[in-house]
Image: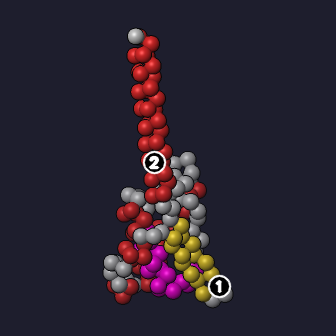
Amino acid sequence: MSYFYIRHFIFIIMKTIKALFILFCSLLLIQCSSTQKTSINVSENEDEHELMVLDSGFESWLATQPSIAMYSYSFLRAKNTIFVAEYNNRVNNRQNYSFDLYPQRIEYSSTEEYNKELQYTLYNYFIYFQKKYNQRL
């Protein structure tokens, strides 16, 4: 009789382990699919610069922000210089900052003449980044 109970107990334990394994795999799959990496790149073609932000939520968030006319070029340039310097500092300081948040340097020069639209988009990206990831640059 005790053999039956031991066998039944082992069967219940195995079902529980199987259910936990399936639950763990499901949670892992959900976590991996919901992880979003944000990437930003300032590139240049001869006389033109381009800003690429690879984050699915940024464009819709940007549409809700004050218009470009609300900011002066000098304000945007000054803020971006500060934000980029701190962001790149964190990229270079891997032991204290996550690679997931700071994957690569932003190639931005404070002496370069970028157009106002690029400055505006970059500035708003930093505002978005700080809010989304609870960071302070």
Q: Of residues 61 and 104, which is closer to you in this image? A: 61
Quadrant where the N terminus lies?
Answer: top left
Q: Amino acid at mark 1?
A: Asn
- Tell me which segment is drawn in magenta: 110-126
Q: Which residue is mark 2?
A: 26
- Structural crowding at the residue carrying mark 2, measured as other residues with C-alpha within 10 Å and reported as few (<14), some (14–19) or many (≥20): few
Which numbered circle lies on residue 45?
1
Where in the figure is residue 102, as x and y percent of width and height? 53, 59
Q: Amino acid at mark 2?
A: Ser
- Structural crowding at the residue carrying mark 1, measured as other residues with C-alpha within 10 Å and reported as few (<14), some (14–19) or many (≥20): few
The magenta stretch spans residue 118: yes
Q: Earlier in the sequence, mark 1 or mark 2?
A: 2
Where in the figure is residue 105, as x and y percent of width and height? 58, 64
State the separation of the CA atoms marked 1 and 2.
45 Å
Quarter location, residue 132: bottom left
Quarter location, residue 57: bottom left
The magenta stretch spans residue 42: no
Residue 129 placement, left or right of 50: left
